């Protein structure tokens, strides 16, 4: 019998998954496997597999030939999972190699829960959903990997690594060789526009939903997929509408001014006060640690400034920026979007903390009854229930930010993709 080609072996594994893993088998049918030559492999930086958001999986035949049947099956589902979780679209301003490691841990935790095997030497999560990563000195422990997103795992690693260049840390610890696949941003050699990315993401979300329903009927939904589908089903109301509703709610109610009589009633000989809606002090807290994209920052500031202009006699706008420490704190007298954006500089790589923000708010001596706090962040920070300022709080969470349930107080809205 002639030896099977790499593609034939891959197809055989997908067929064999139909019985025990119908969800992954059906989803794998949307993948397009492409064998690469030595030249292309070299261009991929030595990686033996590469995957893009469209579903193109580039593989080295020599490497695939060296895998057992069980390892090959695990590798197929590994690449598929990166697409289902949209990891190629969620890197943002983060370090590419470190985010690759974090997303591998996230995916391999799902594979472990479903008893898939992977090649030796990759980042394997144990049965307690823990993984130890080697460092130059000691180890980094990541726990509860089944409950964390790639972004949360990335933040944990970043917090624990020595304060040196991330690339230098990865090479010295050997983590730069822990992965076998490359996440490719291009499709057919070209970068995708935002509209194309949105279309591809929606296409995969629809596929996941359809296959999930079929698997649910058959009673064979893989571990961890319920959570993924639940996240995809989150309703998204336009965040700008919700932001305006929040601010307008803080201005509800009126106050009387007896020194300025109401002209409508003076003609009848009555002295009634004029009334006006309450004003509100809005403190906008902006996380500049680098996980917020330029677009998210621009959209958020544009909307806040627009609201401030619309209600210019009723809103006092204050902007506080921070990473681990507060970097700026100023009041906006005449809101000018261009001026604000010039002063706000995204930093990146410095970590995030909200501790100083809460201290600043506590020290503010102004009347607590007409104040509100709006925070733009990805949520990967030290936000604790005990820090609740007992004021109206609105979290505006950037694209790919942490899950809404991780905010212990306040209301949460999410920027649209």
Image: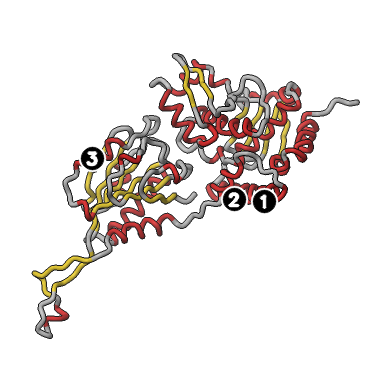
Quadrant containing the N terminus is top right
Q: Is mark 3 on a helix, strand or loop?
A: helix
Q: What element carries label 1?
A: helix
In x, y percent, where is residue 286?
33, 43
Q: Please tell me which residue lies in front, 185 or 279.
A: 279
Q: Name the residue under label 2.
A: 202
| Local crowd size for mark 2, using a 10 Å CA cut-off: few (<14), some (14–19), many (≥20) | few
Q: Nearer the viewer, mark 3 or mark 1?
A: 1
Residue 360 bears which disc, if any? 3
Q: Please tell me which residue lies in front, 116 or 38.
A: 116
In x, y percent, where is residue 200?
60, 47
Q: Distance between the residues labelled 3 and 1?
A: 49 Å
Q: Quadrant of residue 106?
A: top right
Q: Quadrant of residue 323?
A: top left
Q: Is mark 2 on a helix, strand or loop?
A: helix
Whether residue 339 appears in this view of the structure is no
Relative to residue 87, is residue 339 drawn left or right?
Answer: left
Task: Identify which residue is drawn at 32% across, 32% down.
Answer: 324
Q: Are marks 3 and 1 in contact (CB under 8 Å)?
A: no
Task: Identify which residue is drawn at 73% across, 25% down.
Answer: 64
Compared to 325, does 313 lie above or below?
A: below
Whether residue 146 appears in this view of the structure is yes
Compared to 259, does 50 lie above or below?
A: above
Which of the marked residues, 1 or 2, is nearer the chain's N terminus? 2
| Local crowd size for mark 1, using a 10 Å CA cut-off: few (<14), some (14–19), many (≥20) | few
Q: Distance between the residues labelled 1 and 2?
A: 17 Å
Q: Name the residue under label 1.
A: 213
Task: Identify which residue is drawn at 18% across, 65% down.
Answer: 255
Q: Quadrant of residue 364?
A: top left
Which of the marked residues, 2 or 3, is nearer the chain's N terminus? 2
| Local crowd size for mark 3, using a 10 Å CA cut-off: few (<14), some (14–19), many (≥20) | few
Relative to residue 396, is residue 360 drawn left or right?
Answer: left
């Amino acid at each position: 019998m002639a030896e099977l080609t790499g593609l034939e072996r891959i197809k055989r594994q997908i067929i064999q998954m139909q019985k025990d893993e119908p969800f992954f088998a059906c989803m794998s049918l949307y993948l397009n496997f492409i064998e690469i030559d030595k030249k292309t492999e070299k261009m991929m930086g030595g990686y033996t597999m590469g995957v893009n958001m469209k579903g193109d999986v580039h593989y080295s035949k020599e490497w695939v030939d060296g895998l057992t049947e069980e390892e090959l099956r695990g590798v197929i589902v590994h690449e598929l999972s990166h697409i289902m979780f949209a990891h190629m679209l969620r890197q943002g301003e983060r370090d590419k190699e470190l985010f690759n490691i974090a997303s591998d841990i996230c995916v391999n935790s799902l594979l472990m829960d479903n008893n898939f095997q992977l090649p030796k030497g990759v980042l394997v999560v144990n049965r307690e959903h823990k993984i130890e990563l080697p460092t130059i000195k000691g180890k980094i422990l990541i726990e509860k990997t089944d409950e964390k997103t790639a972004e949360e795992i990335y933040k944990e690693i970043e917090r624990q690594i020595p304060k040196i260049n991330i690339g230098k840390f990865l090479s010295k610890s050997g983590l730069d060789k822990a992965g076998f696949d490359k996440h490719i941003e291009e499709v057919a050699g070209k970068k995708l526009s935002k509209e194309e990315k949105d279309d591809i993401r929606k296409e995969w979300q629809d596929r996941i939903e359809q296959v999930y329903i079929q698997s649910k009927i058959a009673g064979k939904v893989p571990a961890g997929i319920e959570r993924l589908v639940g996240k995809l089903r989150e309703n998204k109301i336009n965040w700008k509408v919700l932001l305006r509703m929040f601010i307008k709610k803080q201005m509800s109610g009126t106050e009387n001014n007896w020194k300025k009589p109401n002209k409508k009633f003076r003609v009848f000989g009555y002295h009634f006060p004029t009334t006006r809606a309450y004003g509100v002090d809005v403190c906008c807290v902006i996380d500049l640690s680098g996980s917020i994209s330029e677009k998210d920052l621009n959209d958020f500031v544009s909307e806040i400034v627009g609201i401030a202009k619309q209600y210019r006699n009723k809103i006092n706008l204050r902007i506080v920026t921070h990473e681990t420490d507060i970097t700026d704190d100023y009041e906006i007298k005449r809101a000018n979007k261009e001026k604000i954006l010039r002063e706000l500089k995204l930093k990146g790589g410095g970590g995030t903390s909200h501790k100083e923000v809460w201290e600043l708010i506590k020290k503010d001596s102004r009347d607590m009854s007409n104040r509100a706090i709006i925070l733009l962040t990805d949520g990967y920070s030290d936000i604790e229930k005990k820090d609740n300022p007992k004021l109206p709080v609105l979290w505006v969470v950037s694209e790919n930010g942490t899950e809404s349930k991780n905010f212990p107080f306040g209301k949460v809205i999410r920027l649209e993709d």
